[in-house]
Every structure is written in structure tokens, then in C-alpha cells.
Amino acid sequence: MLAVKDNQPSLCAEMEIFFDQAHAIESDELLHSFHQEIDKGHGRIETREVRVVEDLDWLPNAGKWKNLVCLIEVRSAREKIGSTSNEVFRRLYISSRRASAKDFAKWVRQHWSVENKCHWIADVIFEKDDNVMDRGHSAENLGLFRRLAMNMRIS
């Protein structure tokens, strides 16, 4: 599973258009796997919807991605309890693996957990935000040492 963001602008744009159109039509007309989770806690209600589409005939550059099997959309809506404001997020992924939307939901949550833990370690333990390095390659070198230390700590 690979996240699709601005790292692949044309694929990202094609997927956004596709899923926007998919939401506009009846869900019965689109062959896909769907899973929804609702979590309540920390003063908010979060709803996550995962859609997995294996029909890639419409995707012009599908052959560019070796072994591409499906496209995944994860939509998260956060509602603060007692507030009228909502936050809505969309994340897109591609995968070479066939699986249900429920399985992809689990894997995406695990990925977020690892990513959040790594950012927390970099920010809190290594005080990354407070460190200013601007001579030569010092910032790159320090970054390498931080990642090495983080990997040693996690392993």
C-alpha cells in the first residue's frame, strides 16, 4: 500500500476526480468494497469510511504502476462534541494487494500509528522544532543520526 499525495500529481488528481464522481452516483452502481468505523472519544466523534475499487479500466496510466490491483480512498470526518464545526480529510492509496475495505482500514490505522509515533519522537525526544542547523550539510547529517537513533530505539 502506497500513499498518493502531491508526490504523484496526475495520479492524485485522477483519483480525486474518480472518487468525487463515485460519491455523486448511487453506490450500488459502483463495484467496490466499503467499510465504516465510528469512534467516540476525546470530546469528538470520528467517522472513517474506506472504499476500495479494483476496476481500473478508466485509469489512463494504470500500466505505469507495476502489479497495481486497487485504489483506496479513506475519508475521515471529525465532529467536536458540542460544536458545529467539522473537519473532513481524504487520503488516497494504491495497492498491489487484494483485500477488503475492512483490512485496508486496519492497515491504514496501523500506518498512522507508526507515523505519529515517529513524529512524536522527533519533536519531543530530539526537540527537532527547537534545533536550528544552517551550516553546510549539518541539518542533513543530524537528520540521518536522528533517524538512525529512532530506528534503533523502535527496533
Image (spheres, rainbow, N blue to C red):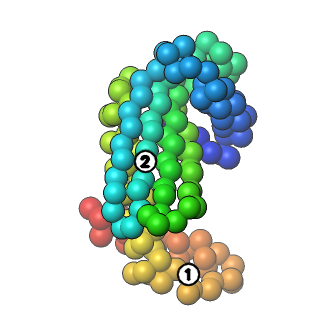
- In this rendering, is residue 30 above or below 148? above
Pointer 1 local density, CA inside 10 Å: few below 14, some 14–19, many at least 20: few
Pointer 2 local density, CA inside 10 Å: few below 14, some 14–19, many at least 20: some
- Residue 85 found in image quarter: bottom right
| Three-letter amino acid code at the position of disc 2 | Thr
Label disc, if present, on residue 6 of the rendered structure: none
Q: Viewed as shown, does residue 89 lie left or right of 82?
A: right
Residue under the image location 67 percent in, 46 percent down: 6
Residue under the image location 42 percent in, 72 percent down: 120
Q: Which is more foreground, mark 1 or mark 2? A: 2
| Three-letter amino acid code at the position of disc 1 | Asp
Give the residue pinned by disc 2.
Answer: 47
Quarter of the figure that contains the N terminus: top left
Q: Earlier in the sequence, mark 1 or mark 2?
A: 2
Question: Furthest-left residue in view?
Answer: 155
Residue under the image location 46 percent in, 27 percent down: 52
Number of numbered labels in the structure image:
2
Give the residue pinned by disc 1.
Answer: 129
Q: Where is residue 97 shown, x and y percent of the image?
A: 40, 26
Q: Where is residue 139 shown, x and y percent of the image?
A: 60, 76
| Secondary structure at numbered mark 1 | helix
Q: Where is residue 77 shown, x and y percent of the image?
A: 50, 50
Q: Is residue 107 visible?
A: no
**Front one among 144 and 131:** 131
